Image (tube, coloured by chain):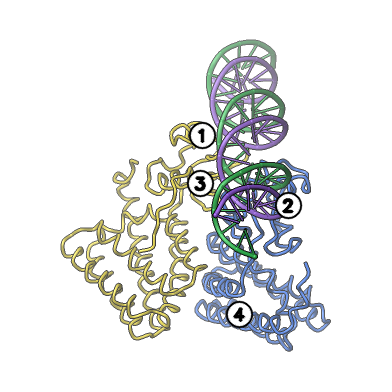
Chain colours: A yellow, B blue, C green, D purple
Amino acid sequence: MKVLLPAPDAYHLLREAIVAGRFHPNERLVEAAVATKLGVGRTAVRAALVRLDQEGLVTLEPNRGARVRLITDREALEIEEVRASIEGLLAYRAATRVTPQALRELHQVMMEMRMRADGGDSLGYSELNARFHQLIWVAADHPTASRLAGGLKSQAIRFQYGTIFRPGRQERSLREHEAIFGALKAHDAAGAEAAMREHLAEVLDTLQWAIEAHHRAPNWAAEL
Amino acid sequence: MKVLLPAPDAYHLLREAIVAGRFHPNERLVEAAVATKLGVGRTAVRAALVRLDQEGLVTLEPNRGARVRLITDREALEIEEVRASIEGLLAYRAATRVTPQALRELHQVMMEMRMRADGGDSLGYSELNARFHQLIWVAADHPTASRLAGGLKSQAIRFQYGTIFRPGRQERSLREHEAIFGALKAHDAAGAEAAMREHLAEVLDTLQWAIEAHHRAPNWAAEL
DNA sequence: ACAAACGGGATTGTCGACATTATTGACGAT
DNA sequence: ATCGTCAATAATGTCGACAATCCCGTTTGT
């Protein structure tokens, strides 16, 4: 695998802390405090905040400092919608470019997903799910779309928590992945795009379900 | 119209200069030089460069400074592909949300586009074209998608130059816009998405044509 | 003649200090 | 009691200076 981990500069440290949910939503990020906490200078923190603002993980108001961005329910759904579009494109392209090697990897990831699903390992399943999509991204050979999709995913990641608890979701998800895989294997571009869109429409639906469930019982996931 | 022009800080100044093509591709952006040229401090320039790097308009290599990003032909095509996906989504949503007021504005813009096309005013046509799409964006009421589409557009804007010279393009473009408008007016979401995708597929094709033409005769548009 | 080490000049990265701006709470007038 | 004023405080924005790094032409050694 080619993923070399990034050097621990202020940007990556802070980013990791945010997407890992180690700050409260809407929490103020005081430059000096963050700087000492991360063990870097205030300058570096400023630069990091600018980047994270542009990236949508932080809001940066002039003269009023930075806050970790509170992604609204609505925005989470919007993000998922856009992601569906872009990943549809990626699947389309991947279908005509995917190598036998990549197909083997995809197949293997899928098998393992099934195992984790049967074993009730939701966390492992999520990770493999991400891996599955990433494999499609590299097969699509479309850096622009991949970059955007990755950025979107990092913003909405906090919301994916709730989606696990939907009954029967994993089995269904598994079948959707199989459909995508089948289209890729057959080099059926339109089919792959359709399958991917359908899959992400389901994810969107589940996300909506999770948000509503959260509104009915806003206790779990309130902390952190 | 609601577009209040941004305060002239270093970021907006520099950004405007870049998208207007006032720098050579791949030109080095020395912080001190840019600072004096824009009449701001080096700190502000640094912040601006970070944002522009994240935005994809400049590349920022550690200890090696910033350059205006040279968008390759391939990347321009990639950007247009992704834009087609996202604007397809926007058209889809706009179809069910567009107000009679917005429809009137769209219609008026279209009429004026026809006039400019007949009058041979390519520049005016381009501006109206951008306006047409923006109207759809606000009708779609989808900030996330609009933001991404806008960012992509600004990156590829340099390439849109050549597309003007394709014979018969404007008439065809006009018909495509009419198709989009018709679907919006009928509140036909799937039709609007399809029309928009078809339109942008044509744009993509024209872009490819322009790039090839440019390779055959790389003299015009070489300067600036 | 060629490659590697060297060094000057230019540019970026970082730090501390200071000016500028928001926020908070107390105080006082109506 | 309520609102407005004002000072105190805290945080951000900006600047200048210095250190670290890179680039490139020159020297040096074989």
Q: Earlier in the sequence, mark 1 or mark 3?
A: 1
Is label 4 in a helix, a strand or a loop?
helix
Can you give x and y, in whole percent of width and height, for residue B24 in the image? 73, 63
Can you give x and y, in whole percent of width and height, for residue A3 in the image? 39, 60
- Chain under disc 3: A
Q: With respect to residue A188, does C11 lie above or below?
A: above
Q: CA distance from mark 1 to mark 3?
A: 12 Å
Q: Earlier in the sequence, mark 2 or mark 4?
A: 2
- Chain under disc 1: A
**Local crowd at mark 4 within 10 Å, few (<14), some, or many (≥20)?**
many
Q: CA distance from mark 4 to mark 3?
A: 34 Å
Q: CA distance from mark 3 to mark 2?
A: 23 Å
- Chain under disc 2: B
- Chain under disc 4: B
The residue most toward the right is B119
Q: Which mark is residue B204?
A: 4
Residue at image position (49%, 34%) is A35
Is label 2 in a helix, a strand or a loop?
helix
Provide the residue designation for mark 2. Answer: B13
The answer to whether the residue labelled 1 contacts the one labelled 3, judged by CB atoms less than 8 Å apart, is no
**Local crowd at mark 3 within 10 Å, few (<14), some, or many (≥20)?**
many
Disc 4 with disc 3 on a shared chain: no
Name the residue type under label 4. Answer: Leu
**Local crowd at mark 1 within 10 Å, few (<14), some, or many (≥20)?**
some
Is label 1 in a helix, a strand or a loop?
loop
Name the residue type under label 1. Answer: Val
Provide the residue designation for mark 1. Answer: A30
The answer to whether the residue labelled 2 contacts the one labelled 4, judged by CB atoms less than 8 Å apart, is no
